Image (cartoon, rainbow, N blue to C red):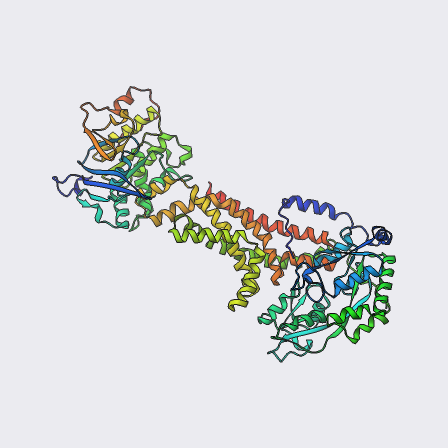
Amino acid sequence: MTATRSTSAATPFIELSRLCRTYVSGEVKVHAVRDVSLTIGRGDFVAVMGSSGSGKSTLMNTLGCLDRPTSGSYRLDGVDVDGLDRSALAHFRNHRLGFVFQGFHLLPRTSALENVELPLLYRVPMIPASTRRSQARSALGRVGLAERLDHHPSQLSGGQQQRVAIARALVTQPDLILADEPTGNLDTRTSIEVMALFQDLNAAGITIVMVTHEPDIAAFCHRTILMRDGRIVSDTRPSARRDARRELAGLPVVDVPTGPSEP
Amino acid sequence: MTPSRFRALSAPVLVLVLFVLGLFPAPSSSARADSWEGLTNRGVVRWANDAEGGAPYIFHPADDASKLVGFEVEFAEALCSRLGLRSEFVQYNWANLIPGLRQGGNFDIVVAALERTPENLAQVGMSRPYFVFGQQLVARAADTGITSLDGLRGRTVGVLGATLSQRLATEAGAEVRVYDENVNYFRDLELGRIDAVLTDSPIAEVNLRDRPLLRRAGRPFAPGFYAVAVPAGDTRLLERIDGAILELYRDGTLERIYRKHGLWSSEQATIGTWTDSGEAANPVTRPAGGFARWNVYLPILLRAAVTTVWVTCASMALAVAWGLVLAVGRVYGPAPARWFSIAYVEVFRGTPLLLQLYFVYFGLAQQLGWKLSAGAAAVLTLGLNYAANEAENYRAGLQAVPRGQTEAALALGMTPWLTFRRILLPQALRISLPSVTNDFIALFKDSSIVSVIGLVELTKEFLIRALDAGDYLGLGVMTAAIYFAMGWAASAAARAIERRLHP
């Protein structure tokens, strides 16, 4: 589903070059990210680790086109993101990226189905309601919530809410999912369930960049980047990766999401 | 002048209390005891007037604001001293002087240009005249067409409420606008909001001195008498006062006082020759009470409630729209918008609504020539004032929406404007709704303040009719019930909206 968008096999999917981001707070200059260069290939699954203030949130915001670098360049799938204006950036986020947050950030008092439809709701030209609905239903099916379409966030467990949020990120069929501590609010078992889902999506070709504080969770990824004081201090690929599905099979069955229903 | 507010008690409790009280007849005023004994024991007479009455009756002179002067002040002091008692002034709202006297306790007599009319005689005892006045028609100097009351059919005439002027102007077929005190109608006449003023000659006399734009239209007519009011049935006190007035007239004290204020005229001779023609013996028959005649008064009150409803709804619409702009400016705007919004809110909620109303209605007209109608001025003032409250309600709502909602919406690819409109605003309004409902109901009651610029809304109509009927309790129950019904309808609507927003 992503092959058609690739401009050339030789171009890296994500290409950050000499990225700097400086905030001015009164008289003080804060260097959040200092001279970071990074490439991430299509289909990679990257964990970004580091203590607070290490620059990982700024890096994620830049990758998510929510923040602009002070200097340096950012190319995503061959597109020079710096050259886009505000509404073009919004369009780009809507069509190419999916976001998952630690606090889920679902609309309260709104059903799971409507929450997942939201990214499709304000597209121009308009998507017919029936198409929106069926795409949202299939995204919820992919995360194993086909039976919970009409539930409101307050009627769902934390793990289920995070799966609705993942479905919302998936419904636009993005090439890249950015997740900011997606398991930070979840217990161990539910965290593994969410990681199983991410591993399934990654296996289906979606590139994932995920911030986490927990080395146990980073161990589910292909690659771990460690940041400190705005710089990348290590970039490793563990030889043995944890397999979430297999670990879940060894745990008592409670409410395991099924695997992806489409290729 | 202060609007009556029923805020402190919850409306249903108030209605219940008034209803229960309404079942018992008011105490008969004729059973009041003789007060002369008490007065001589105390050695002092407490006489009531309203210092807002102004020159020449009772006023603070320009050179010494701590003093109270005027021909009624001097007359009252002379009267008390002739009775052999000390004089003590009691400040009381003019429109409530007669009910206040009937109720008793606060003051003993009223010396406040009360007219010796059958209506007043039916409620309180009245002395022989201490001053003879006429009705004076006043028009703009430039408007030479107006010469007498007969020429005023269909034109707008300002009068004081519950006076002979009001009755005469109404009978002449004029469009009557009722005022609470006697400076505002001259101001409105100068500004061209009304065509003429019909008022007591002393008021015209003094006000024409420094208003070159206005002129007397014709001679004074329809002579009337100012008399001292005492509690009904207190004949011994009344006889003493009648005797004292006659003495003050005969020894020239009254002439000296009235000449000093430029008010002496040959008509004052009536004070000496007057005899009781017996109108006190045949008081106008009054209905037993407003409550018994609900079929007459309820429709009148309901018509006035229509004014309350439209003033309230229009003001609230303005307050909601403008308040939203202010709140957005404060939360998301650049520094100048933020500062403007903060200053606006502080100024509008930090100054009295009544003052703002005068500023908009008279201030703008006099300084800038913006002659707003009373309705427009009322809606504008209430709207601008309540916008300050609404702005704070919406700000609370906007700030209560979790930050993650904005982050998520932007990340989903919504533009900042779309995020505000579709994600933040609906959630913020939902949070603000209970406070907004609260303000809406409060506005129904606060809207009564607009009566000071001549709009007859529910509370004003209640005051006028209660004075007519001499029944504050029965009409009060009806009025409270109407306010309650309006507030209840507003809450019910708000609850329905809330149910829709919180499925």
Displayed quadrant of residue B53: bottom right
In the foreground, B258 or A252: B258
Displayed quadrant of residue A185: top left
Horizontal placement of A18 versus B52: left or right?
left
- Residue that lies at the very extreme toward the left in this rendered image: A10
Q: Is residue B423 above or below residue A219?
A: below
In the foreground, B352 or B9: B352
Q: Going 45% across and 44% down the picture, which residue do you hit?
A: B397
Horizontal placement of A236 versus B362: left or right?
left
Displayed quadrant of residue B73: bottom right
Q: Is residue B274 above or below residue A227?
A: below
Q: Is residue A32 above or below residue B263?
A: above
Horizontal placement of B84 versus A42: left or right?
right
Q: Looking at the figure, which quarter contains the N terminus of chain B?
A: bottom right
Q: Going 25% across and 44% down the picture, which residue do you hit?
A: A68
Residue B163 seen in the current view:
yes
Q: Position of residue A191 (x, y in %)?
A: 32, 27
Q: Position of residue B295 (x, y in %)?
A: 70, 57
Q: Position of residue B77 (x, y in %)?
A: 78, 61
Horizontal placement of A94 versus B192: left or right?
left
- Residue that lies at the very extreme toward the front in this rendered image: B63
So how many labels did they put on this image?
A: 0
Residue B470 seen in the current view:
no
Q: Position of residue A209 (x, y in %)?
A: 24, 34
